[in-house]
Amino acid sequence: MSRWPLHNVYFWETAPFFRVLLPFAAGILFYDKAGISVPASVSLTIICISFLLLAAVVYYRKNNSAYRVVTFSLVNILLFFCSYALSYNADIRNDKRRYGNSLNGGNTYLVRLSDNPSEKENSWKLPVSVICSIDNGRSQPVTGNAFLYLYKNRVPMMLHKGDSILVPGKWEPIKNAGNPFEFDYAGYCRRDNILYQQSCSANDVRLYGSADAAGMAVIDRSHDWCMTQLDKYLPDAKTKGLIQAMLLGDEVNLDEELRQSYSETGIIHIIAISGGNVAIFFLVISVLLWWLKDKKHLWIRYAVALPLVWFYVLMAGAPPSAVRAAVMFSLLAFSVMLQKSNNSLNTLFATAFVLLCAQPMWLFSVGFQLSFAAVLSLILFYMPVYKWLSPVHKPGRLLWGTVAASIAAEVLVAPLVVYYFHTFPLLFIVANVLAYLFMGLVLVLGIAIVLLSFLPLAAKCIGICTVWIVTLFDNIVVRLQSMNPVSFHYLVLTGLELVCLYVTITGIVLFFMKKQKQGLFVGLTACCLLFLSFCADEWQRLHQQRLVVYNIGKTNHVELISGRTYSELTTDTVTEKKIAYATGPAHINWRAWTKAGTKAGEIWEVNGKTVVILNEEIKGDAQFHADCLVINYTGQPDLAELQKVFSPAVIVVGNNYSRKQQGKLAVSTGANIWPVADKGAFVFE
């Protein structure tokens, strides 16, 4: 008997939201990168025209290739400009009411603390929302968010979330330091609609109104209450900070060294609220509804859990990973309640589409990208990896299931981790297996502390047990961290190499899973291009030589990069942590993370050019040509005299001078002055 012919469909036919997501994401990317601000009215006009043309084409439907091309093009144009319009609308820079449109240093601004102050080395960081601008007693309602830094004094911080304060109008745009390969903090804040900041003393601000606890939203009050219970029953500071971050998404008390250890061992994901938290939360609800055993009543569990999951996610601050998990859970819950089949791959793409409609700039969020990649990797590779082994006993199957999930998730997550964090945990399987077990246990204990807080003795006992488990796990993590090779903390992938790596993975997977020879050819070609790029990068770095004057606070730090090593020419040993933070990205990306030592001297040759680091004022009229002159002493330099003696192409003024002094020097003569505080790090190569 002949079989009915089967049509081998492509995955985008079973997951149609994939085709929707591509042009939609392209519109967001174009808005962010192109620097072209098309008014919303123009975008809406294009959308309307595209929609009308699409309707006309569909009405006069013809079954030919030209019709399909036109329809496909119109749909993609429509989605592209829809995402562009959403991005334009979500950008605070296009809001006529934002306070940044008419900044006035003489004005006073009324702001409200949108979160609790976080402690820095020399100041307190206060996230605020600007309410109104006050000029000569007249107030003008405005909108926007900002950061306020209050210098520390002997008085403890008395401000809290929800307080309203009056601040001066000394707003400054958020800028990057300009050091090589540094994190784009200004871009990160811009995509979060935070464009300005200011630093002032506590005497410059005045309390206008204290937070009204009764007027706070239920979500905020619930968050604060849960934070209080964890603070009360967890005696250890590190444990308290970790549980508050894992359970409530509040990282204000999270220990930085602990965060670094978790990051370098590849388990930083357990701190972020994501699908694991939602799964455990749903498990707790299912246990409380244990009496609903009949499968017919399964929908009741999801109906009860759905609003509670969203309440929990909002209470935790609604980070991208948590919202992604909540949206996916919502789609799953609706499919169960409506008794519809669920395509996990299409659900993931639909979730990403919904999230980007609500927050277009989440496309650039590292957390969103890692969360999306992890879930996609699990959907695609978990079952194939799980089938490698067939454990007989249930404990073995559970353990192998955890190992298989760890391996499957790393397939698509590892390239992103290397690209963003320049590290790869060699023992990720061991670390993730322990982390998943630890995460489930600790989250359940944290929930138990909150639920049993009305029984102080029980909550206290659970808190002590939690501290012991967290301390034991932290010691294991530190041990695993020390076992990772040093070179694995300095890995580099460029954007092109990242694309080549993903094409390689895709091609090889298509060959082994779908038996497509074309996939193997494409994968091997991309792999060859990847290795050629690695070789070119290595050759370039072996022959590199550059002198760098970094922009680091009040420190004048100069380095000589030569081959795969760096040497410190001038530095300040008091600010080692600040120096390491600023120079680390450059050392990694230039593959020069080995220190050759500290070298003394004033005259250096860089690629045949002469660089003079002037450590003291010169006397006399002798002439010595220098292509670059770095001023490395305090006092008022005579730029005209320096120009006459050295005839440099550029004079670099470092941070041994204040920003104001550097600005004055830059405009005091016709010489080519590079003020580091204003223009960022100077790289001579």
Image (spheres, rainbow, N blue to C red):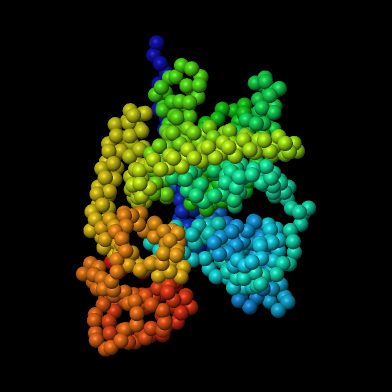
Residue 146 visible within the image: no
Residue 616 visible within the image: yes
Q: Residue at x 39, y 10 (%)?
A: 1
Q: How many marks?
A: 0
Return the residue nearer the eye: 575 or 392: 575
Return the residue nearer the eye: 649 or 591: 591
Return the residue nearer the eye: 139 or 401: 401
Q: Residue at x 42, y 74 (%)?
A: 656
Q: Is residue 407 above or below residue 298?
A: below
Q: Is residue 110 above or below residue 238?
A: below
Counting from the top left corner in percent of width and height, residue 638 is at: 37, 86
Q: Residue at x 64, y 56 (%)?
A: 115
Q: Residue at x 51, y 19 (%)?
A: 394
Q: Is residue 521 above or below residue 684?
A: above
In the displayed image of the protein, which residue is found farthest to the left? 608
Q: Is residue 218 left or right of residue 389?
A: right
Counting from the top left corner in percent of width and height, residue 682 is at: 36, 69
Q: Is residue 434 left or right of residue 458?
A: left
Q: Quadrant of residue 608?
A: bottom left
Counting from the top left corner in percent of width and height, residue 158 is at: 69, 61
In the displayed image of the protein, which residue is found farthest to the right? 214
Q: Where does the C terminus fall, quadrant-wise?
A: bottom left
Q: Quadrant of residue 522?
A: top left
In the displayed image of the protein, which residue is found farthest to the bottom? 621
Counting from the top left corner in percent of width and height, residue 260 is at: 47, 48
In the displayed image of the protein, which residue is found farthest to the top? 1
